[in-house]
Amino acid sequence: MSDKLLTTREASTFLRVSEASVRRWADAGILTGSRVGRRGARRFREADLLQFMQPGNRRPTPGAAAARAVVIQGMAVALGSHLVSFYSSDAGRLRVPVPFLRDGILAGQACLMFVTAPLRELYLEALSAEQVNVDAAISAGLLTFMSMSTRQESVAGWIADCERHVANAVRDHPGPVRFLGETVTALQSLGSVQELLSLEQQLAPVVRRLPVVMLCPYDVRTFDGLTIVEALKLHFDTYSYQLAYFLS
């Protein structure tokens, strides 16, 4: 293994992500790096990059909890997991995501949501019914929201925004992060199913390198069969657990 220190560009090529992602991860303390020279240029060791690529071996931010998984329905789900769930009714929409968020908030883990305003109110009402003090959770920063752009957003822009929110969550609440990304909301934000599936494909390697478990619910009343099949293929982490639980 080479002892050469890699530049940000070389590290991004090594990890197969953007330079912006490398900088954000280094600034958040998620990726180990150093500063050299009078200008403080970033440099990265190949050994640290290889360790970073291993699920569960990401370097936590200072003071971060040592947890490498979150518990979902008794299942220890590894950080870096990109999960999918499916529902076919309004009641089914809430069955998996609400316990996912509730358990995180009650455990003091940061929870992020990407949902439309009407869906936000639906989820907050359901969380309140589960004895979650929603106002206190929002005030404490345990429950935050990734805003939906008022204009059509690019896949790269969405991922960059997601990374910023996760980095902020880890900084304020060291430990695992739970991210709920409603795909009907992403569809509205991105403008097409093709762009949504492109986002899902590009998200997988990004999520794998972050201290986050991401859940992406799909409304089968909105998406056709081919899209559902593609969604299953793009969320292969789900197969490591009880797949039936994620089907509503």
Image: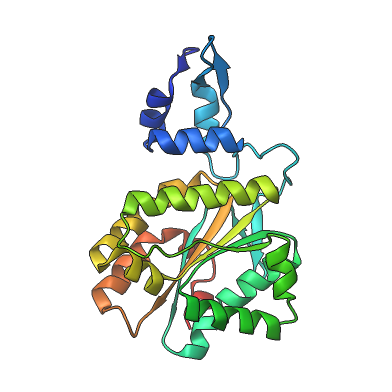
* Residue at the extreme top: 37
Q: Residue at x 56, y 81 (%)?
A: 121
**Is residue 218 or residue 185 the one in the foreground?**
185
Whether residue 98 is visible: yes
Instruction: Name above or below for residue 11 compared with residue 235.
Output: above
Q: Residue at x 75, y 75 (%)?
A: 133
Left/right of residue 11 with respect to residue 108 in the rendered view:
left
Whether residue 1 is visible: no
Q: Residue at x 39, y 29 (%)?
A: 14
Indicate the colouring scheme.
rainbow
**Is residue 163 or residue 46 the one in the foreground?**
163
Q: Residue 123: x percent and y percent? A: 57, 79
* Residue at the extreme front: 150
Q: Residue 52: x percent and y percent? A: 54, 35
Q: How many marks?
A: 0
Instruction: Name above or below for residue 155 compared with residue 129.
Output: above
Left/right of residue 27 with respect to residue 63 in the rendered view:
left
Instruction: Name above or below for residue 30 compared with residue 208.
Output: above
Left/right of residue 174 with respect to residue 39 in the rendered view:
right
Left/right of residue 244 with respect to residue 105 in the rendered view:
left
**Is residue 67 or residue 239 the one in the foreground?**
67
Q: Residue at x 49, y 48 (%)?
A: 163
Dividing the picture into quadrants, the one containing residue 241 is bottom right
Instruction: Name above or below for residue 207 compared with residue 110.
Output: above
Q: Residue 184: x percent and y percent? A: 38, 74
Q: Residue 100: x percent and y percent? A: 61, 70
